[in-house]
Amino acid sequence: MKFDAIILGAGQAGPPLAVKLANAGQKVALVERKYFGGTCVNTGCIPTKTLVANARAAHVTRHAGDFGIATGDIRIDMKKVKARKDEVSGESRDAVEKWLRDTKDCTVLTGHARFIDDNTIEVDGKRYSAERFFINVGGRASIPEIEGLDSVPYLTNSTMMDVDFLPEHLIVVGGSYIGIEFAQMYRRFGSRVTVLQRGPRLVSREDDDVSQAMLELLRNEDIDVRLDVDSFAAEKRSDGIRINGIDGSHLLLATGRTPNTDDLGLENTSVKRDDKGFIVVDDTLRTTAPNMWALGDCNGRGAFTHTSYNDYEIVAANVLGIESRRVTDRIVTYAVFTDPPLARVGMTEAEIRKSGKRALVGTRPMTRVGRARERGETFGFLKVFVDADTKLILGASLFGIEADEAIHCITDTMYAQRPYTTITHAVHIHPTVSELIPTVLEDLKPMEGE
């Protein structure tokens, strides 16, 4: 059977692209081998942030006395916690599948797709051809090399979604974004938690002050964080596992992601991959095969739901001739959904120093933010960098209550390529976190050492 376009994978980029192309009059097929919605809907953003919300409810309840509210014993029913997560995730997954199946000229194929050549795939013994292919197959948890790991049961971000009990002592290998979210979450549910980080800092792609603040946040919640762990060795125990001499009940591996490109038959095509397995793409996400594009986590150009969706927008705009869009137009922005969250946009201080740009920086502790004081959540700080010559905003790190929302007024100003005075001249609602960003920008100083 022949189609105008075949899309592999129903993650965040695949379904909207399938619907967009079908509505444009093309005959489209989308292939999904397991769960509709991809990582975000099934094992990533939606279920984990649902769990984060559950854990925050427990945390706030424990501290209700600080607000003059009396509560009794706090009990966590992990089966109900998981059931709520499953419901929220399941609704999203079902909605994606229904959307696709209800779209005219969109055929949904379930099964594992492999390329026969540049123009043909095989799904469960049946062959399908198309003029264009769009690869949106996502990624999976990387499994590190750890001595003895083959004899030890372990969890990943995916299998954590099946947990309906409270681990007595959860050991997390990996101190980056996924690891620290789960660490805080399960500590708030009531587990004892230990984090083992290979390097000297948590969230090592961030600036030093952010890493130090993240360490402080976790330790304030009685999470045991071990840094500079040079090597790992694990062994099974009768009552759990032991890793580097630490006894725990369960082990979570949170050491990065690997693209799902190793079982697609890409060796039968002219599509090239890099040494980490990511599909090589140009600035419009076209692969080295002229009739194929790669979107989402499998192309190595972003590892977030919002970048995957932006990949769809870029590809759709170019393929359908709507407008010219490029990946390099995208500004790096993301959040870490600890409580409080860390939100980032643009360049870090380290990147600015490396670039040689003359920069100004404004900072403000969250203790001076009215919204934070009212909520009794004053941990963190606001930090914004500005180009001293152009007055354009170079980047920001906001770590504190509602930072994941407040960051967008900075992000939008950067996309508009307007000077920082666009924000300082604007009137913001009081009392909010966003209203303090103009204050931060009105107190700019040269970076230390400049």
Image (spheres, grey):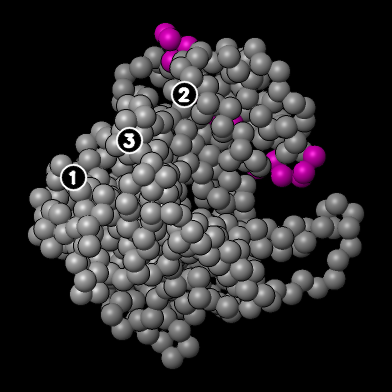
Image height of 255 relative to 273, above or below = below
Is residue 303 shown left or right of residue 423? left
Q: Residue at x 64, y 69 (%)?
A: 84
**Residue 127, image quadrant:** bottom left
Residue 46, position as x, y percentages in the image: 54, 58
Amino acid type, mark 2: Tyr
Name the residue beneath numbered marker 1.
291
**Residue 366, image quadrant:** top right
Give whichever of 90, 421 is nearer the camera.
Answer: 90
Q: Say which element carries label 2.
A: helix
Nearer-N-terminus badge (1/2): 1
Nearer-N-terminus badge (2/3): 3
Nearer-N-terminus badge (1/3): 1
Give whichever of 21, 304 is nearer the camera.
Answer: 21
Give the number of the mark in front: 1 or 2.
1
Q: Residue at x 46, y 24 (%)?
A: 415
- The residue lying furthest to the bottom in this view is 238
Separation of disc 1 and disc 2 at Cα? 31 Å
Image height of 7 relative to 320, above or below = below
Query: In the rendered image, is residue 115 in sight?
Result: yes
Name the residue beneath numbered marker 3.
320
Q: Is residue 174 magenta?
A: no
